[in-house]
Image (spheres, grey):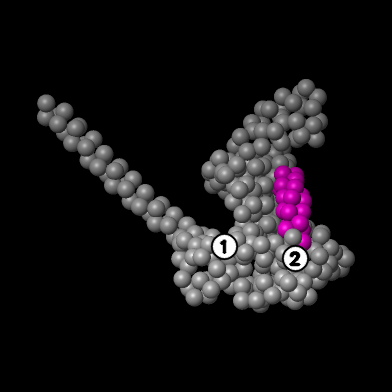
């Protein structure tokens, strides 16, 4: 009887500890959620508010003097459409190139029969600590005749070894070596094995890495800032940067009616363009969210 009471008390104490831990964890998550959501709500509310309310600092979490004129004004700005077009192209093409290069690099590094994999792992690891620097990289891009071309945006940062590590670890821990041995016995070539077995089995991690690269490419403006002078090649984020810095639109980019509409709206239009530039990724993210936990956990193993 006494033993039963002791066991009951022990389970009761453990249950109380679990409840306290869960309460603390939920509280922390709620606080972090509020910290993230409140600024987003403020940006969205400001984008739908009148310029007078925004300039007066009246907008907090809900729109004041609700209006769609801010979005209509932005849509009249030709550079926004040019930037959208270019950013969509850079994101799509850059993601494909980056995922392919990462996969081509990760697969041999995950293959145990590749005798030089330890050397190349250490060599590539150095790139996470050291890099050539901005000026040497610019000189290389210039000497390769890539300046003022789409390749200057896509190639210099096409691959991240951090993402290669995640993909390599996934292949090592998910795809058994016996599968390759069986395929080789049946006469399967390395290229056929890679296409027919490795790529289909690595679809979850490919989805994760593709999202990583897509987000980075969509938000990137620095390569374009360094290597592009032709505004027809500018990504959306570079136009956004110019607007945030100058707080006004260039008269050369607008017709007279648009210039009049824009006067006094600079602060409000900043919020509108932030919403416009981030909305596509926010719509895509829920469809690949289920792969993120698996990808992050795999990347934490043997990293």
Residue farthest top in this picture: 186
At mark 1, the secondary structure is loop
Alpha carbon distance from label 2 to label 1: 22 Å
Type of secondary structure dominating the magenta stretch: helix
Q: Residue at x 65, y 76 (%)?
A: 263
| Crowd rating for badge 1 (residues with CA inside 10 Å; few <14, some 14–19, many 20+) | some
Q: In this rendering, would 188 be left or right of 203? A: right
Quarter residue 51 falls in: bottom right
At mark 2, the secondary structure is helix
On the question of residue 42 being in view, the answer is: no
The residue indicated by pointer 2 is 79
Q: In this figure, what is the number of numbered marks?
A: 2
- First to last magenta residue range: 82-104
Q: Nearer the viewer, residue 66 or 152?
A: 66
Quarter residue 207 falls in: top right
The residue indicated by pointer 1 is 67
């Amino acid at each position: 009887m006494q033993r039963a009471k002791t066991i009951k008390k022990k389970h009761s104490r453990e249950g109380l500890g679990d409840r306290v831990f869960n309460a603390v964890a939920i509280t922390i998550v709620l606080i972090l959620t509020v910290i993230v959501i409140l600024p987003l709500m403020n940006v969205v509310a400001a984008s739908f508010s009148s310029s007078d309310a925004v300039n007066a600092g009246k907008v907090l979490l809900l729109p004041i003097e609700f209006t769609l004129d801010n979005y209509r004004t932005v849509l009249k700005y030709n550079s926004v459409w040019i930037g959208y077009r270019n950013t969509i192209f850079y994101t799509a093409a850059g993601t494909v190139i980056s995922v392919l290069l990462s996969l081509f690099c990760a697969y041999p590094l995950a293959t145990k029969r590749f005798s030089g994999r330890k050397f190349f792992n250490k060599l590539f690891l150095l790139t996470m600590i050291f890099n050539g620097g901005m000026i040497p990289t610019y000189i290389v891009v210039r000497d390769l005749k890539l300046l003022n071309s789409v390749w200057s945006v896509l190639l210099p940062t096409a691959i991240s070894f951090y993402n290669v590590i995640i993909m390599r670890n996934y292949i090592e821990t998910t795809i058994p070596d016996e599968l390759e041995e069986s395929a080789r016995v049946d006469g399967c070539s390395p290229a056929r094995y890679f296409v027919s077995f490795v790529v289909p089995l690595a679809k979850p991690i490919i989805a994760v890495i593709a999202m990583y690269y897509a987000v980075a490419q969509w938000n990137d403006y620095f390569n374009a800032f360094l290597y592009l002078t032709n505004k027809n090649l500018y990504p959306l984020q570079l136009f956004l940067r110019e607007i945030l810095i100058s707080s006004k639109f260039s008269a050369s980019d607008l017709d007279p009616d648009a210039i009049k509409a824009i006067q006094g709206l600079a602060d409000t239009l900043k919020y509108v363009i932030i919403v416009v530039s981030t909305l596509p990724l926010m719509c895509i993210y829920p469809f690949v969210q289920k792969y993120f936990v698996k990808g992050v956990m795999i990347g934490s193993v043997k990293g």
